[in-house]
Amino acid sequence: MRSGLGLSGRRESHVLHAFVCCCGLLLILGCKGSPPAGSANSNGPATTIKLDGTVDKWLKKTPVWDNGPVPADISPRDIHIMKVFFDNDSHYFYAFIQCSPTVQDRYKVTQFSGAIGQLYFDADNNPETGGPSLMGDSNPKARGYKIKVYLPLGVFSGTSGGGAFASYEIYRFTGQNLDDNSGFNAKIPNSDQDDMHPNTLIADGKDGVEVAIPLEMLGMKPGAMARIMIQEATPDQPAGFTTYQCR
Ligand SMILES: [Ca+2]
């Protein structure tokens, strides 16, 4: 009986020990901080900002460009960029493009593909290096860019219906074919993203389009200043110019 009781006691002790260990492990995991905002993907680790196309989490920041409300004279088939916000972590540059109509609202009006616009990056912060002026004049603000992030919109249809999606593609300025979209014609390998698929680095939602781009693809480094030009696809709309200090 004595040994039986002892065995039972040891079992209880083991169970208790396992329970304490599990609680300890959970406590340690819990103390490591919030779970990652996004999911790991083919271009790197999980994003630290959840990409969902909602602007709420950006409103404590000052937009880098405030382009005003939708002009009365543009077609509802066009997308107007209203505000743009930037941020970064150690791996990704983030942009929130607040726009109207949204990608999905535009689809209710037109089922054709299109584009939101493009962002040009000049990671060396020097107008004298990179491409020529993108505005057909000598405006130094519009020249010297090396990377173009193009933001096309796609549509799809299938037996269960259709829809629209946002995407991005990244091109490097090569200095060749200057009359062909200013020479931004070298596509960066593995840069394509679209939000038709899970775990991609772009999302569209009720307030706009949200992207994460590996800093390396933009040539940006933590601590460095970059020049960035923002251009919406709607014809004859003003471009935005800003600088961004990478954290
Ligand atoms: Ca430059």
Image (cartoon, rainbow, N blue to C red):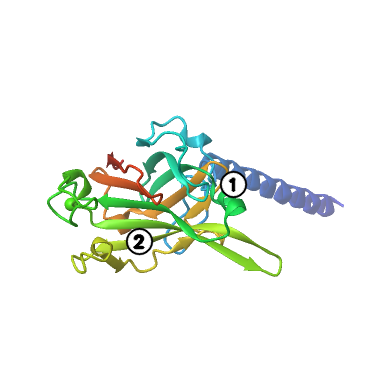
Residue nearer the viewer, 126 or 115? 115
The residue under label 2 is which amino acid type?
A: Ile
Label number found at residue 199: none
Residue 3 image position (x, y, % from top left): 81, 54
Residue 219 image position (x, y, % from top left): 26, 55
Q: Which quadrant does the C terminus fall into?
A: top left
Residue nearer the viewer, 15 or 62? 62
The answer to whether 34 appears left or right of 89 in the picture is right
The residue at label 1 has a CB less than 8 Å from ligand 1: no
Residue 97 image position (x, y, % from top left): 44, 44
The answer to whether 203 appears left or right of 169 in the picture is right
Quadrant of the rendered image containing residue 243: top left
The residue under label 1 is which amino acid type?
A: Leu
The residue that appears at 14% across and 54% down in the rendered structure is 129
Q: Few, some or many C-alpha atoms within 10 Å of disc 1 (few <14, some 14-19, many ≥20)?
A: few
Residue 138 image position (x, y, % from top left): 15, 48
Residue sitting at the far left: 128
Q: Secondary structure at mark 1?
A: helix
**Which residue was labeled with disc 2?**
170
Label number found at residue 25: 1
| 1 vs 2, front mark | 2
Q: Would you say the residues marked 1 and 2 are in contact, meaning their CB atoms lie under 8 Å apart? A: no
The image shows residue 207, relative to residue 129, as above or below, that is above
Mark 1 → mark 2, Cα distance in angstroms: 43 Å
The residue that appears at 76% across and 48% down in the rendered structure is 12
Q: Few, some or many C-alpha atoms within 10 Å of disc 2 (few <14, some 14-19, many ≥20)?
A: many
The residue that appears at 62% across and 52% down in the rendered structure is 108
Q: Tell me if I can see residue 54 in this picture.
A: yes
The answer to whether 146 appears left or right of 215 in the picture is left
Whichever of labels 1 and 2 marks the residue nearer the N terminus, that label is 1
The residue that appears at 19% across and 68% down in the rendered structure is 176
